[in-house]
Image: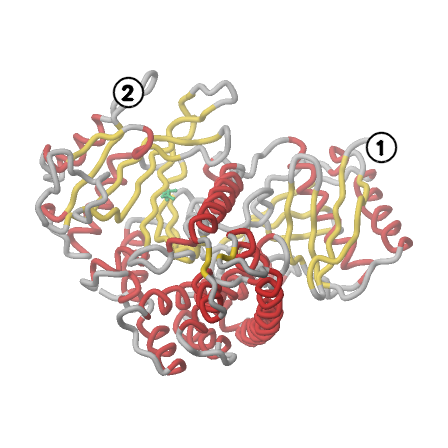
Amino acid sequence: MEADQLREAFINFFKSKDHAQIGSASLIPENDPTVLFTTAGMHPLVPYLLGEKHPMGKRLVDFQKCIRTGDIDEVGDYSHLTFFEMLGNWSLGDYFKKESIAFSHEFLTKHLGFTNDQLAVTAFAGEEGIPRDEETAEIWKSHGMKDEQIFFYGREDNWWGPAGVTGPCGPDTEIFYDNGQPKCGPDCGPSCHCGKYTEIWNNVFMQYFKNDKGEFEPLAQKNVDTGMGLERICCITEGKKSVYDTSLFTGIIAELEEISGRKYEGDAIRDFRIIADHLRAATFILGDGVVPAKVGQGYILRRLIRRAARNMSKLGYDEVFMDRVCAKIVDQYGDAYPELIREKDNICRNIRAEEEKFHSTLVKGLRRFNEMVANAGDAKVMDGELVFRLYDTFGFPVELTAELAAEKGLTVDMEDFQNRFRTHQEKSRAGSEQTFKGGLADNSEETTKLHTATHLLNAALRELIDPNIRQKGSNITADRLRFDFNFDRKLTPEELKSIEAFVNDAIQKDIPVVCEEMPVEDAKASGAIGVFDNKYGAIVKVYKIGDVSAELCGGPHVSHTGEIQGFKIKKEESSAAGVRRIKAVVGKF
Ligand code: SER
């Protein structure tokens, strides 16, 4: 079964089990303070897992675009990716273990054609205060799984969350594909990396809340959160050895072969894979309105584009080529992700601009390299620091520097470079884990106030400055809100004052904040603003603040604007080309 059919089969199966389909959310988390990207299907659902009512009901299904950059250096092997799609189904306080396992088993065996022999499953082994999950094992047995196919593991393998320090979490049961090869040793099992087992589905039973004392309290609302990586399952159902050989990639790789005149074989395989992965991720990030920048999502985007350019250069191709590949990716994914079609021109234009810019960096880097060589005097070895600087600042791959150095009769201190590289990698990995850990949008009083203030600010900008202003990004921490919007010049001090006055006026009037649920078409017709992407036919929540603001949003919000107390703009600055950024605080001043 190929990718398009898999998505469809998954959605239809869960629809037949009374799940409502929700659209894939943006890769840029809405109102989530600390994460750069949506990293799992559950991410956009966090408020609902914490108890907010979801307008589409208690059983949901979707496919969600995700980005994880923690393993970016691993990309190029047979399985690692930065962009992937996650198929997921959720129970928000509805069914639990028994039904969840039954659904997964039925889908895998009846719809994807797996036999029980091809599967292995895991359950939580238990620890102090939390019992061993015998219930899950018993349920699997009732579906014909044998004792030797059921493995118990501890927290490392069979526990998911909380995404933050506190929050919902729970044991999970993971489902593996067993390719039938002999065990590599007596301890071989799903947690072994010998290749016998591939994880295909993770069902998390969110039944605990980890509190700030580190204790696990039973959760009032027990949820199920499942995730199945589309690329991996595709790899198995299409009978391929690598995710890059599946229908998700063959078109992209063929296009790259045609452009470069090289074949996807031998030493070139890794470069092809890196280019294909990075350009797929870049296309989707650009499709969600991000442009290359020095920080944040824009920086990750820039890194992906530059790495792709470098690898294409390694294949011997130095012309501008990326917009052509992006157009191909849009055509392939446009049915599942219509936003790509809408944004096609922007995607192609922005990637081309960035690619052209990098070509000039490449030239500057070469100049710097020549200076370094000139300064090296009689030294025969280029030290690791210089090599690392070329890598870090100009994006020079160490292989390229080594080649250039050899032409000048120099070698490169590889060991020193590798040490620096590793330290850097550990730091960036720790950084990305950190970002993800903080990812749970906490529904504290402060962030709720800031959230409602964001709606008022959005309304003020459209009312006072320009009705075409649209939200380009929103980020809330416990201390401040940050709002990005399209506008092409600096706001004057008078304009900023008038915006503050508008918001403070709405706060003083203590207007009730009312949430209404309605079909998305009605929300649109009523003039509510917000991101309507991928929500066709859906029931959505519209938060109304008197006649000041009506915005599509998941919440939560204060019940009366007076709770915000006061609003103050701290900063107005440029965020990217054509995008301005306002930082503001709330409270009593
Ligand atoms: N949240 C879990 C995961 O990311 C299940 O969807 O694997």
Q: Residue at x 70, y 43 (%)?
A: 481
Q: CA distance from mark 2 to mark 1?
A: 50 Å
Q: Is residue 225 left or right of residue 430?
A: left
Task: Tell me residue 421's x, y (percent).
Answer: 47, 49
Residue flagged by tag 1: what amino acid is it?
Phe
Image spot of residue 116 (x, y percent)? 11, 46
Q: Quadrant where the N terminus lies?
A: bottom left
Q: Is 374 located above or below residue 433 in the figure?
A: below
> Image quadrant of residue 233?
bottom left
Badge 1 is on which residue? 589
Residue tagged 2? 131
Secondary structure found at label 2:
loop
- Name the mark on residue 308: none
State ligand 1's quadrant.
Answer: top left
Q: Position of residue 115 (x, y in %)?
A: 11, 50
Front residue (pair 413, 244): 413
Q: Secondary structure at mark 1?
A: loop
Q: Amino acid at mark 2?
A: Pro
Query: Is residue 430 placed above or below 332 in the rendered structure?
Result: above
Residue 6 occupies quadrant? bottom left
Ligand 1 within 8 A of label 1's CB?
Answer: no
* Crowd band around label 1 with a 10 angstrom C-alpha radius: few (<14), some (14–19), many (20+): few
Residue 319 x/y as whole percent: 50, 81
**Which residue is at 88% across, 49% downward?**
497
Nearer to us in this view, 352 or 207:
352
